[in-house]
Amino acid sequence: MNKARRKAIMEAVKKIEDLVQSIYDEEQEAYDNMPEGLQESENGLNSVEAQENLEAAIDALEEAISYLEDIC
């Protein structure tokens, strides 16, 4: 794989990371704006789980970017 292709892939992964981070921020804000009783409901628990999964995805994307930087 040449340098241009690696750079294109890295840029695409960074864009995806930014998008996932934005979705995470929106989900966290929605949860924070829920009344306390609703935060403890199934919807609130689903929101927390989604946030945790989004955080894991962001971590994985950051790791992918790190690997790509190592080969660029």
Image: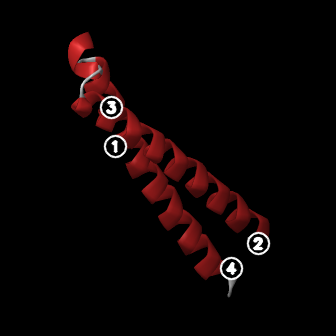
Using the rendered image of the protein, determine whether residue 35 is visible from the camera's viewpoint: no
Number of on-image labels = 4
Residue found at the very far right of the displayed protein: 70
- For mark 1, what is the residue? 23
Name the amino acid, label 4: Lys
Q: In the rendered structure, which amino acid carries the disc numbered 2?
A: Ile
At label 1, the amino acid type is: Ile
Element type at mark 2: helix
Q: In which quarter of the view is residue 36 placed?
A: top left
Label whose residue precedes the other's in the sequence (3 or 4):
4
**Nearest the eye: 36 or 3:** 36
Q: Which residue is mark 4?
A: 3
**Can you tell which quarter of the image residue 66 is in?**
bottom right
Camera-side residue: 48 or 59? 48
Q: Nearer the viewer, mark 3 or mark 1?
A: 3
Task: For the residues labelled 3 and 1, say whether their Cβ atoms are less than 8 Å apart.
Answer: no
Q: CA distance from mark 4 to mark 2?
A: 8 Å
